[in-house]
Amino acid sequence: MNDKEKLQNLRHTSSHLLAAAVMELYSDAKRTLGPAIENGFYYDFDFTEAVSENDLAKIEDKMHELLPKWTEFTHKTVSADEAKQMFAGNEYKHELIDDFASKGEDLTVYECGGFVDLCKGGHVDNPAEEIGAFKLMSVAGAYWRGDENNKMLTRIYGTAFSTQKELDDYLLMLEESKKRDHKLLGKTLDLFTFSDMVGGGLPLWTPKGTLMRNLLDDFVWELRSAKGFEKVEIPHVAKRELYETSGHWTKFADELFHITTREEHEFVMKPMNCPHHTQIFARFPHSYRDMPQRFANTTMVYRDEQSGELSGLSRVRSITQDDAHVFCREEQVHDEVVAIWSIIKDFYKGVGFEDLTISLSMHDPDNMEAYLGTEEQWQYSEGQLRDILEQEGAEFFEAPGEAAFYGPKIDFIGRDSLGREWQVATIQLDRFMPNRFGLHCINEEGEKEQIVMIHCAIMGSIERFMSVMIEHFGGAFPVWLSPVQVVVIPISEKHVDYADDTAAHLTEAGVRVEVDDKDETMGNKIRKAQELKVPYMLVVGDKEMENNTINVRTRDGDQRGEMDIDSFTNEIASKIVQKLLDL
């Protein structure tokens, strides 16, 4: 068991402890379910009285009181009737029991410290010793089973760690993350907005935000173009048959936006791009001499996310993907994967994530119904990616159950300035979609040869990636990525013309510059520029006009003093071209 699984088990155990404490304090409450989640755990309850965040302290105290008695888990398998007797009067548990029984799944109950719950397992052996620290974080409403037609329950969120230090470090990180919240900074820096008239989860990008998106996408394209990719474009809707053939319909039918035409034809807003790209490849027969074919396409896809799951740019309904697909022969897979890998390394160096962790995301052999193909096919594809990673000398860990339904993948994980991990780029190996669409090339013997499809996204979702970038830099972006790179500040009205001339000189060199000629004090102008995270402030007055210079300040308070305009222009232009991170 790896460290991540141990932490998940610890947090799942903590959710049981939370439920036990709640049931002691609110005996008429009905408990439902409580999983471990990315940063902690939660448990949903149907209370007969209002419970708020003011009640968390006493619930937490009760958890501490119970914990010393939680020394060992025991479990047993029970019948549906036995389970219903154990949870008599709890319609939520009864519904779960019926669901599990209808699927032929075993019903297991776990007991610890006198508390019994319906559960599939995944706990620490001795909670009293292994749960070092926990904290209840918040209270929220949540529909039973995520269905807005069901009753609204009370969800209590918490987090847990093996040691108090880990908890303290996490809480400190949360405090810092509040200051860097992309939803707040996005408004302050005027990067994006949301409108109730447009709809939740559908961000609108301002000129500054659009500029940043384009800068990032242009960087990806610059790297892809050098590796032989070609741009393609596709429509935003497609017939359902396309996704039935690809296999996506079975998996994602409930998450799609459905469209019925006036002639009763069924279309959907595209939830992903790969099926469209297969049809570009299939437009005419390909010789082995044509291979590989590399298509790149930055375009939006759409998912019918539930309102309660939407969160700023992190979870949206319109998702811009910097998507690409390589159609190649078997013997070309290694070189194509390595080429994409080099793009990923170069891109993330330019955006401040140089040390990427690599995961080989594999299928779950105990849940083959979740995937296309056979166990043997999966082992072959996973072995191929594993060999590539080993031959390239990469350090990586294996993650069973994390593969896409159509193939294994290499996932790249970045750690931001607060120590949080984010899954960023991905390379996915797919033999099933080419087979379902009958994609092939004509080989040297004149025979049809099935090809391999490699899915690759560098940023993945640009919306989600922007949220990570905003919080990673706290809005203080590298010079090359900053919407405004320089603000020229004239001390008084008589210095405005010189400020305009300075700005024109910088603009000619490709620098994004503004002149703040408002009737305000210089101090106010400098503070405003710092709040907007502008990298450089150039103050000009009598002395600078006389010497044909500028007085340079940075957003972090460094006063560089007087500089020759050409020297500064050359310095900042070099930093932009090289995509340097430091000022």
Image (spheres, helix red, strand yellow):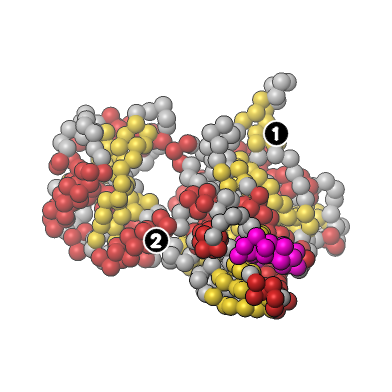
Residues under numbered marks 2 and 1 in contact, where contact means CB atoms less than 8 Å apart: no
Which residue appears at 63% of the width and 47% of the height?
A: 206
Which residue appears at 60% of the width and 65% of the height?
A: 491
**Label 2 to label 1: alpha-carbon separation:** 46 Å
Q: Earlier in the sequence, mark 2 or mark 1?
A: 2
Secondary structure under the numbered disc 1 in the rendered image: strand
Q: Nearer the viewer, residue 566 or 140?
A: 566
Check disc 1: other Cα within 10 Å, few if <14, some if 14-19, many if 20+.
Answer: some
Q: Residue 221's mark? A: none
In the image, is residue 425 above or below residue 153?
below
Q: Residue 176's mark? A: 2
Amino acid under disc 2: Glu
Q: As drawn, is 440 to the left or to the right of 358?
A: right
Q: Nearer the viewer, residue 495 or 58?
A: 495
Q: Position of residue 518 (x, y in %)?
A: 61, 55
Write down the residue under mark 1.
Answer: 239
Which of the 4 image quadrants contains residue 344? bottom right
Which of the 4 image quadrants contains residue 165? bottom left
In the image, is residue 123 above or below residue 115?
below
Which of the 4 image quadrants contains residue 379? bottom right
Q: As drawn, is 536 to the left or to the right of 438?
A: left
- The answer to whether any part of residue 350 appears in the image is no
Q: Which residues are magenta?
A: 480-507
Q: Position of residue 323 (x, y in %)?
A: 67, 53
Q: Position of residue 405 (x, y in %)?
A: 56, 49
Q: Quadrant of the N terminus?
A: bottom left
Query: Is 303 included in the stretch rendered in magenta?
Result: no
